[in-house]
Amino acid sequence: MIWHVARKELTEITRDGRFLWSAFIIIVLLLTSLGVAASRYGEDRALREAATREVRSQWLNQGVKGPHSAAHYGVYAFKPSTPLALFDPGLNDYTGTVTMLEAHKENQASYKPAQDATSLQRFGDLSGAMILQLLIPLLIILLCFGMISGEREEGTLRQLLSVGAKRSDLVWGKAVGVAVTLGLVLVPSVLVGAVLSGLIVGESDPHDMIDFPAKVAVLAGGYLAYLAIFVVVSLTVSIMAKSSRTALTILLGFWILNGLLLPRAAADVSRQLYPTPSALELSQAIRVGRDRGPHPHEPNHPNHIAFREKLLATYKVERIEDLPYGFFGLALEADETHGFKVFDRHVGELNRRYAMQNRFQQAIGVLSPFIAVRSLSSALAGTDVDFANQFAAAGEAYRRNLVKVTNDDLKRNTVGWTTFDAEWRYKAGDDVWKRVPAFDFDAPPLGDILARNWLPIAVLAAWLFGGVVALLSVSRRMKIDV
Amino acid sequence: MLKAEALRKDYNGHMALKGLDLEIKPGEIYCLLGANGSGKSTTINLFLDFIKPTSGRALVGGLDAKQHPIETKRLLAYIPEIVMLYRNLTAVENLRYFSGLAGHSEYSDADLLAFLERAGLPGHAPHKRVGGYSKGMRQKVGIAIAVAKQVKALLLDEPTSGLDPKASNEFSELLVQLSRDGVAILMATHDLFRAKECGTRVGIMKHGVLVGDLATQDIGHADLEALYLKHMHD
């Protein structure tokens, strides 16, 4: 009986020119956005891989030079990107994808297209994810808003019930009809889009493909649940509303609240609740903190002198040349150790605040399935805040090891050298550079993503469950006449 | 086949139906006359279980419509003032949909066409979308739905109002044919002439009470009109 109803809905929907046009437009948008994103992803990946090789080879082949100069010269780390990022660019435009790793400084990731854009950028590029998160729900609303209220207004509902149709069969038949219609539109275009993107992107590095099929499966499940929520909510409203017009108004209100107002409000409120310092304030705070360090490059700075005196006293020697380790190496090491604390405090606090903002926004997702599916989707695509923070943490850990290797070399090999000689005359070679491994950081496996995103998954499940229960309960009490 | 037992319906203090007793046997065409708001549609809606009685019972084939909403609907068909159909579907598709919901998914296209033909739908019409149908054609599709359902009882709510005399006449003939096949028919109508022509019995309702109940063969057309007006003036 449900199939019988579903088939009739399918026939009716597909005969409606408005539906055919909107479906056509959405298919074209989806394929275009995936195609464009795939070619951009392919180019970016080629650049990233070439740059990664280049950076490594420059580091290894920098020849004979002072190790601390090498540390200043530094390396670049590139945030890995799975092919899912072409479907959901997430926050990449805001978090940046390239970090310079060098002595003395913990840099924030750069290359953020959002920096050069107006606040309209917040509405984002038209990505595949955006189409599934905002446009398809709109299509669902337009398909469903009059499904019951319209039949009630037309009088066909009375006719249907008079032949002995069960209310629940009608409602679920309609839900299945919409699902099949959308499936006929979406499944082929998503498959074509995936194959097209696959062809454009070509074969990916296995490091970018960790748990790829499983991530795709969870992503598909998440979006299925999200779209199903819109079907059951739309039908519920269509049953309860006094007229089709009211139903449409309510549902459009829900769409705007869900996809535009709540996400925007959540972002703004979270920034009010957990304010973050500006880039200028952050760099000033760090400079003030770092200024208390031993200033290894300035032998006449009071901090430098104090550090030297304390060191000479500790080792009970008169001259720095008599110390068991190279003084310049020790000074740099002490400066870095001091710097790590400063960075841990200020950058750590910044990241904690970002994480709090993110948690707050996820919590608002209880009211907005859009926020929930956006969190889950960008997490699976490796374009979320958590992964950006992991990337930053991995880069910082790499940087700390790099300065440790170069400073250790100075400590060991400039015993008895003056500071000037250690800084300007001492040279290290390939063996030191080889001691710093290549930056190796991958997108997270599925397990980590799921563990971090239980809240959005629970929110989607709860909305779907609540929607089904609401639909069941209102369909039993469905009014027959206007 | 259709039986009302002390049937009452109370809408927030307004008594729409004040204890109706009525029985319509197979083959009978019972025409309910009365002004708007006299309780005719309420009676039909109670048989359809679209509204619940305040007290009393509406029985279809011996089953209480309130207790057995699905089973009683298997036995009856309903034709309102305008049969509402899906405008983007053809007559055949509409008929297949309604028959399928009524539990008859076994009909072939040929069967469905035969039902529509029997209901008098012109030969070119069944494969056209019903959006362009006249009211008379819609009513015929309604009859086809009833025939395809193989019903035992038919409930009609002013089915001929607004039909031209020829279409109205064709419709009445279809009702007479159905009653010969043993269908019990309850028709609410304002059309005294049609009631006298095709009805076997006539009931006159006023303020929720059945004030007159007589066999049409016992009364002439003019007398029926006089009787009706007399009741309305009281």
Image (cartoon, coloured by chain):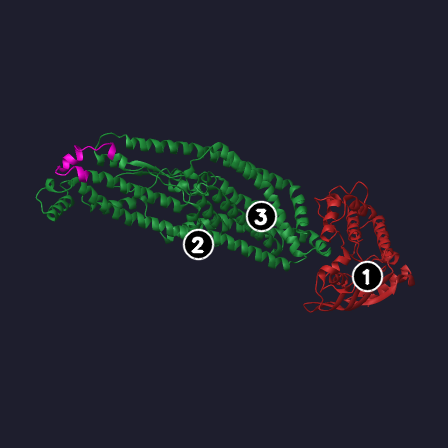
| Mark 2, residue position | A363
Q: Work out how far the residue at label 2 is from the one at label 1, CA to CA, in angstroms.
A: 63 Å
**x%, y% of residue A341?**
25, 48
Is A68 displayed left or right of A122 in the figure? left
Quarter-of-image position of residue A393: top left
| Mark 3, residue position | A141
- Residue A81 visible in this rendered orientation of the protein: no
The red-coloured chain is labelled B
Quarter-of-image position of residue A105: top left
Q: Are marks 2 and 3 in contact (CB under 8 Å)?
A: no
Do discs 1 and 3 share a chain?
A: no
Q: Dot 1 falls on which chain? A: B
Question: Which range of residues does the magenta coloring cover?
Answer: A410-431
Is A65 displayed left or right of A251 in the figure? left
Of badges 2 and 1, the one in the foreground is 2
| Mark 1, residue position | B33
Q: Dot 2 falls on which chain? A: A
Q: What is the number of the mark on residue B220?
A: none
The earlier-in-sequence mark between 2 and 3 is 3
* Kind of residue indicated by mark 2: Ala
Most foreground residue, A62 or A341: A62
